[in-house]
Amino acid sequence: MQYKNINYRDYYFVIFKSRNQAIQLYYTMEKKRTPFFQLISTPCHIRAGCNYAIKFSNLNHYNILKNEAKLMNVELDEVYRFYIMNGKRTYDNITSSVI
């Protein structure tokens, strides 16, 4: 698996109901050679426990992920935007604006 370096100062990520769903969808995207996604640990203050999220740098890539998830019967739980403002890490839940 090739490591993808997505901008760490401004990005989006989607979380899932289970870590298995995140891993399954991520590896499917890898097999399709879509270079837009990276598997990350879900930030602890958003969801406790061992969970994964899929990170992407452009909100347009969310539609690619959403379409593939639908084909696989994988439910996308919530979508967040991460950015740094005045040195502070900020996570905004943007689920309602991307549905």
Image (cartoon, rainbow, N blue to C red):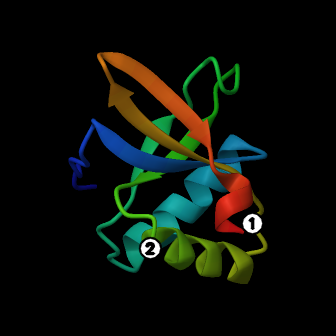
Identify the residue at horizontal 66%, vertical 26% (top origin). Answer: 46
Density class for disc 2 (Cα within 10 Å; few <14, some 14-19, many ≥20) is: few
Identify the residue at horizontal 77%, vertical 62% (top origin). Answer: 75
Tag count: 2
Viewer-closest of 72 and 66: 66
Is 82 placed left or right of 53 in the picture?
A: left
Q: Reading the chain from its start, which is encountered first: label 1 or label 2?
A: 2
> Which image quadrant is residue 10 in?
top left
> In the structure shown, which secondary structural element does the residue marked by tag 1 occupy?
loop
| Label 1–label 2 contact, CB within 8 A | no
Point out residue 35 in the picture as x, y percentages from the top left corner. Answer: 29, 68
Q: Which amino acid type corresponds to the residue marked 2 in the rendered image?
A: Asn
Is 37 placed left or right of 22 in the picture?
A: left
Identify the residue at horizontal 57%, vertical 52% (top origin). Answer: 23
Q: Distance from label 1 to label 2 (Cα)? A: 19 Å
Is 9 placed left or right of 37 in the picture?
A: left
Classify 97 as above or below 77: below
Q: Pointer 2: what residue?
A: 60
> Which image quadrant is residue 70 in?
bottom right
> In the structure shown, which secondary structural element does the residue marked by tag 2 occupy?
loop
Classify 37 as above or below 78: below
Point out residue 36 in the picture as x, y percentages from the top left corner. Answer: 33, 65
Q: Pointer 1: what residue?
A: 74
Classify 25 as above or below 86: below
Q: Quadrant of the C terminus?
A: bottom right
Q: Which amino acid type corresponds to the residue marked 1 in the rendered image?
A: Val
Is 87 placed left or right of 17 in the picture?
A: left
> Which image quadrant is residue 29 in?
bottom left
Classify 96 as above or below 67: above
Q: Quadrant of the N terminus?
A: bottom left
